[in-house]
Every structure is written in C-alpha cells, then in structure tokens.
Image (tube, helix red, strand yellow):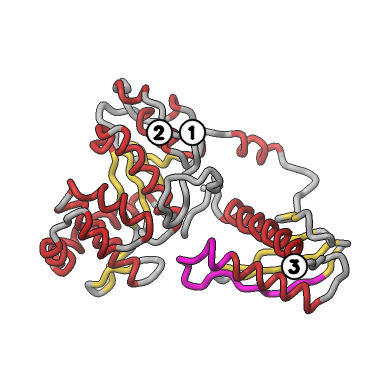
Amino acid sequence: MKKINLSFLLIVLMIAAFLIGYGSKNGISLGIFDNQKAEEIAQQAVEYINQNFLAMSEEGATLVSVIEESGVYKFTILIEGQEYDSYITKDGKILFPDGVPMVIEEAEIEAAAETMTCEDLDKSNEPIIEAFVVSQCPFGTQMQRILNEIVKNIPETDDYIKVKYMGEIQDGTIIAMHGDEEAQENLRQICIREEQKDKYWSYIDCYIKEGQSEQCLSSVLVDKAMLSQCMKDTSRGLEYAQKDFDSENEYGITGSPTLILNKKNVSEFDFGGRTAEAVKTVICCGFNSPPAFCDKELTKDSAEAGFSPVYSSGSAAGGNMSCD
C-alpha cells in the first residue's frame, strides 16, 4: 500500500489551504521573507493540523524550520519521528508537496498504472472481507463508517464482513498503536462483536459519531455486565483479540485500515476509493456468482475520517491514508 507519500500530500494540502486562508484573513503575506512571521504562520498551520487532522495521534506534527530556497519558501515538519519538506511560493498561493524528478523510469510508470479489477480477485461461494482497523485511527473509523453504511443499506452483507483489530498482547495486557484508551476500546468492540453480535453495528454506528463509549453502550442496550466480564476474563476477551492479532501477523498487516478479501490483500482504491459503493463492489467481486443485492448502488461519496455525526459532508478526503 502507498501510505506515506499520499498521507503527506493531503497534510501539506491542508497546510496550503490554511496558510492561504490565514494570510488573507489577517492581512499577512509571505511575499517578503520575515523569519519571525513565517515561523509564526507555519506554527499556526501545525496547530491547525494537530487539532483538526491528527487529534488522535499521540505526538502530532511539529514545525522544524522555515527557510528561503530557490525562490520559494521551504518548511519542514516532523511527524512520528520523520521529517517532511514542502515548498510554497512567496505569495503563499501555490504549494509544492515535494520535488518531482524530471525523468520517470518506465517501470515506475507501469507500476503506477497497475490496478486490480474484479476479474483479478479470488472468488468464493461465501466470500469474507476482513477489515483490519484500530478504533481511534481516523482512517479506521472511516472504514467502519463505510462498512456500517453498507450493512445499513444491505443487511445481508453482514454475513460476509468481519471487522478485525490490530495490536498485540504483552504480559496479559492488550496493546494498541495509540495507547491504552484505544486498546481498551478495541477490546470492548471485540467483545461486543463476539458475544453480543446483534449489538455490534448499532454500537459502531453510535461510536463513530463522537467516540462516546459509555453513552453508546447505554443507548444501544449492550449488556454491560456481560461486556465487563468478557473484557476481564483472559479466556474470553484477550483470547478473541489474540485471534485477530494472529490474523494480522499472518497477512502482514501494517496499516489501519487494510482490507483482505478471501485471504488476499485488496485495495478499495482500485474500485473507487473510500466509499460505500467501492467497498460493496469489492465484496461482490469475491463471489463466484454475485447475489442480487450486488445490483443495489450505494453512495460514491468519500466517507468522513475520524469521528463525525454524518457519513459524508461532501468534502471528505479521498486519499489512501492509514495509521501505521
């Protein structure tokens, strides 16, 4: 999966939009290099990214430097231990996410052109799509929002969808990439999935709106006593979780979300992106003989990432991004 370049592309485009809006609103221009002012504006951009795009990240982005280079401004940000450079024109209107080589190798062109089609996917009478996520990754909740939308509109698809969670167990404790709060929420969702399956999608439908676990447990009438016992009983909750983690390791999963259809990695972006219609198409491509429900067309709008009260605002990002 192509993750980091596309992820960074969206982030820097957000920076560009913010810088343009901020400069216009406040009468500030990057036309004359003023190190103090450039640093101030860049820091505002970083704060905007952290508050609106990386809110669930433990570290977020930090500004490293702002300099003038080759007639434009170059600024560097640090995300999860890695530095990324971007360039912006002196009037603050045009952003260049990265340098582009003038010569592109033929092999790179061929690789970029390769996409999977329905005919390329393995078939089964009863296909299973496994969606690997973590509960506080904005792109994990984006995929859960998509799957929830599919099940809402085509209930029969529930039989062919399995949401699985990424993580590991260390010394009898569940671990997740974004810390203990996420680990416990992963375990909570796993226990509901396994022991109160009829409540799973109702809970997810509520949780992806604001991330209010307690409120959602009450509103969808989850048996809290049963859930608590599952989460505390290592022979239940942790055992269920370990099976997910074993699958994660078997497939070599590294990012949330990742889709596996009939035990093979598949990208929703080959079929239209992070939309309900695209993922439904992936599921239907896994059938030897697609059932009648595959004829029902779902929304082609990109789903909102992160917590959101709506499926799509019409401006949801469509990039191939994940939490790693």
State if disc 2 and disc 1 touch (CB < 8 Å). Answer: yes
| Residue 28 higher or lower than 207, as above or below | below
Q: Which mark is residue 26?
A: 3
Give residue 168's position: percent from left, percent from top: 31, 65
Residue placed most toward the observer, 8 or 216: 216
Determine the image quadrant of residue 64: bottom right
User: Which segment is the magenta one?
Assistant: 49-67
Which residue is disc 1 drawn over? 271
Give residue 70's position: percent from left, percent from top: 87, 62
Give the alpha-carbon distance from disc 3 to disc 1, as whole Å: 42 Å
Give residue 278's position: percent from left, percent from top: 45, 34
Q: Is residue 160 left or right of residue 83?
A: left
Instruction: Describe the element under mark 3 as helix, strand or loop.
Output: helix
Residue placed most toward the observer, 33 or 286: 33
Q: Which mark is residue 282?
A: 2
In the rendered structure, does residue 66 fall within the stretch colored magenta? yes
- Residue type at mark 3 is Asn
State if disc 1 and disc 3 touch (CB < 8 Å). Answer: no
Q: Is residue 160 left or right of residue 142?
A: left
Determine the image quadrant of residue 61: bottom right
Structural crowding at the residue carrying mark 3, measured as other residues with C-alpha within 10 Å and reported as few (<14), some (14–19) or many (≥20): few
Instruction: Describe the element under mark 1 as helix, strand or loop.
Output: loop
Q: Earlier in the sequence, mark 3 or mark 2?
A: 3
Instruction: Describe the element under mark 2 as helix, strand or loop.
Output: helix
Determine the image quadrant of residue 283: top left
| Residue 255 higher or lower than 262, as above or below | below
- Residue type at mark 2 is Val
Give the alpha-carbon distance from disc 1 to disc 2, as whole Å: 7 Å
